[in-house]
Image (cartoon, grey):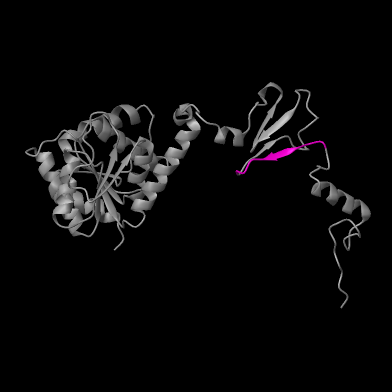
Amino acid sequence: MTENAVTFGGEQPIDGQSANEQAENEKFADGQPTNDSTVEFNGSDEADGTSEDDSGHSPLGESYRRGPVLLRGSMVPSDNTTANLLKEEQSTDWLHMDPWRVLRIQAEFVDGFGALAELGPAVSVFGSARSKESDSDYLSAMHMGEAIAKRNVAVITGGGPGVMEAANRGASSVGGKSVGLGIELPHEQGINQWVNLGISFRYFFVRKTMFVKYSSGVIVCPGGFGTLDELFELLTLVQTHKVKSIPVVLFDTAYWRGLFDWLGANVQGRGFISPLDPELVAFTDDPDEAVRVAVSGIAR
């Protein structure tokens, strides 16, 4: 076998290369680009600068690329990514700009998925944060939380006081999984003391995603705007076939019946919504019946 010697001093050509190819290599070795376009690599995932395909062909003037973004003419910046990264005494305004918010939103999804991925079957219980311990709604929610946990099903709530606290209290009292998905609000007290797996979110839409993704059934107790928001969000997703149908139980028939009678007579009557699947929503005043229906979608 013949061995090919390769030298780097330019004394003889590299085997298999023409003299022109070797000359081009020598230019790179001397730090000379082979064309007039330059690409500046900044030690990050981005390459800032002009590229051969973009430079010299636009009537708008010089072309400049910052990662996937193309800038021309007056839009070409006077700085670059690396210089901005290493610059001292920078303003912190970027903390309040949309690109940074996107990263925070992404982080919330990652945290939520990571915490709940191995939760197992679960039922969400929605209801008012203003119910007192002596209220019938509170006592019923506590009973339902306990009954759900005894079936080895996790209980998920919004993590707050009132009905949410009651359902968490019932689940934790029998050693069940008691989950609280809290939200940062100015006047809320945070995650209640009966939660044994809690997450606090900045963004409502991330929190709602967790409710829908990890619930196999829902019990909705009497509540205000937050409870109505969660109910209608779920019904909208089911009616538009964005998620699979899951059992939804409306606890306290007298509280809910008037709303759904209005939806049927006025909203559906004027053709604004399709008829609700009668199997989708169940009305009951019996906590045990509410639990039975809510867990009926869980495969055993």
Q: Main secondary structure of the magenta part?
A: loop
Quadrant where the C terminus is found in the figure: bottom left
Q: Residue at x 38, y 37 (%)?
A: 205
**Looking at the image, is 192 positioned above or below residue 22?**
above
The residue lying toward the viewer, choosing from 86 and 221, is 86
Residue 242 visible in the snapshot: no
Q: How many marks?
A: 0
**Residue in the picture at 34% in, 31% down:** 268
Task: Please state which of residues 226 and 27 is positioned toward the viewer in this rendering.
Answer: 27
39 falls in the magenta region? yes
Q: Is residue 142 visible in this depiction of the protein?
A: yes
The residue segment tinted magenta is: 36-44
Residue 54 at x, y = what percent? 76, 34
Q: Is 173 situated left or right of 66 in this image?
A: left
Rendered position, 171 above or below 78:
below
Look at the picture and state if 61 lies above or below 37. Answer: above
Q: Position of residue 189 (x, y in %)?
A: 21, 35
The answer to which of 244 and 148 lies nearer the viewer is 148
Q: Quadrant of the N terminus?
A: bottom right
Q: Is residue 30 left or right of residue 97?
A: right
Query: Can you name the residue that lies furthest to the bottom here?
Result: 1
* Residue at the (17%, 34%) spot, across then down: 255
Q: Quadrant of residue 228?
A: top left
Residue 46 in the image: state x and y as whole percent: 63, 41
